Amino acid sequence: MLENVETRLTSSGPTSSIQVRELTLTDVVRSLRSGWGDFMAYPSHAVMLAIIYPIVGLLIARVLHGYSFLPLLFPLSAGFALLGPFAAIVFYDLSRRRERGDILSAANVLDIIRSASSGAIGLLGAMLAVLFLTWVATAQSIYNAFFGFAPVFSMPAFLEHVISTADGHRFLLAWCAAGLMFAIMAFSISVVSFAALIDRRASATDAILISLRVIARNPITMALWGLICAGLLAVAIAPFFLGLAVVMPVLGHATWHLYRKAVSCA
C-alpha cells in the first residue's frame, strides 16, 4: 500500500523531481545530534525566539485556572505538538544558513517573510491552526459528553475521578484516541513540509506531498521520529512549559537535518 502511495505521488507535478531516501535509526540519532549542535552554536537566537512558547504556556495555564477551564489544559498543551512544525520555521532557516556557511543575524528572520514560499508557509500554517482549533473543540465535546457542562475547580479531584472510575477510563480512552488521530494528521502533512518550503520554491500541496512521500518510504523510522518528538515535548511541557525553550529549537533544527537526509533533487 505504501509503495502505491509512493508511485502516485511521484507520477507528476513539481514533486516528481524530488528523490526520497530511506532513513535509518542512525539518521534519526545524527539529526538529533546536529540539532543540538545548531542550538549550542546559536543559543541566543534559539532561546530568544523560543521564549514565547513557555510564556504563552504559562499564560494559558493561568487563564484556564482563573476561568475554571482546567480540563482544556491538556488539549491546549498538546497543541504545541500540532503547531510546532509551523512555529519552528525559524529554526529550520537557521540550520539551513549555518549549513551553507552564511553569516547569521536577527535580520535574517525577515527573509522568511519575504521568501517566495511565504504564501505557502502561511497557508500550511493556517491549516495547522484550523486543525488545532478543531482538536480543542473535539476535546471539549468529549468532556461534555462524559461530564456535562459543569466546570472543574480542582485538577487533583478531576484527575482522581478520571483515574479511579470506569467513566473516567472511557473518557481518557476517547480523549487519547481523538488526540492521536489529530496528531497523526498534523504529523503527516507537516513533518518536513515547512522545511521543504524553506529549502525550495513550492506550493503548500507540493510540500504536503513531500511529507507524505517521506512517511510512505520510511513508515517505521518516521513513526519513531514522531514518538521521539511527542515524548520530548511532553517532558518539556511538564515543568510549567519551561522545557520548550530548549526542546522546541532543538527539534526544529533536528527536523531540518532529517529533511536533508530524506530529500534530494533528482
Image (cartoon, grey):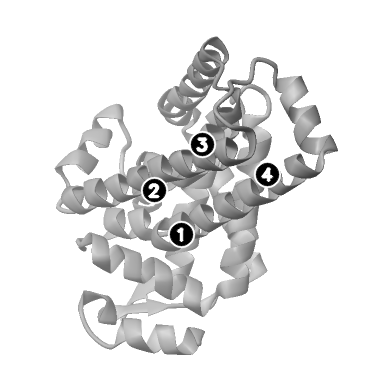
Q: What secondary structure is marked by label 4?
A: helix
Q: In front: mark 4 or mark 1?
A: 4
Q: What secondary structure is marked by label 3?
A: helix
Please give left or right for residue 142 compared with residue 104 in the image: right
Residue shown at the point (50%, 40%) measured from the top left: 141
Please give left or right for residue 12 compared with residue 40 in the image: left
The residues tagged by marks 3 and 4 sit, at their Cα atoms, a distance apart of 11 Å
> What residue is pinned by disc 1?
185
Q: Residues within 10 Å of mark 1 (few under 14, many from 20)?
A: some
Q: Which of disc 3 and disc 2 is earlier in sequence?
A: 2
Q: Residues within 10 Å of mark 4 (few under 14, many from 20)?
A: some
Q: Which of disc 2 and disc 4 is earlier in sequence?
A: 2
Q: Amino acid at mark 3?
A: Gln
Q: Amino acid at mark 2?
A: Leu
Residue shown at the point (40%, 45%) measured from the top left: 134
Q: Which of disc 3 and disc 1 is earlier in sequence?
A: 3
Q: Which of disc 1 and disc 4 is earlier in sequence?
A: 4
Q: Residues within 10 Å of mark 3 (few under 14, many from 20)?
A: some
> What residue is pinned by disc 2?
131
> What residue is pinned by disc 4?
171
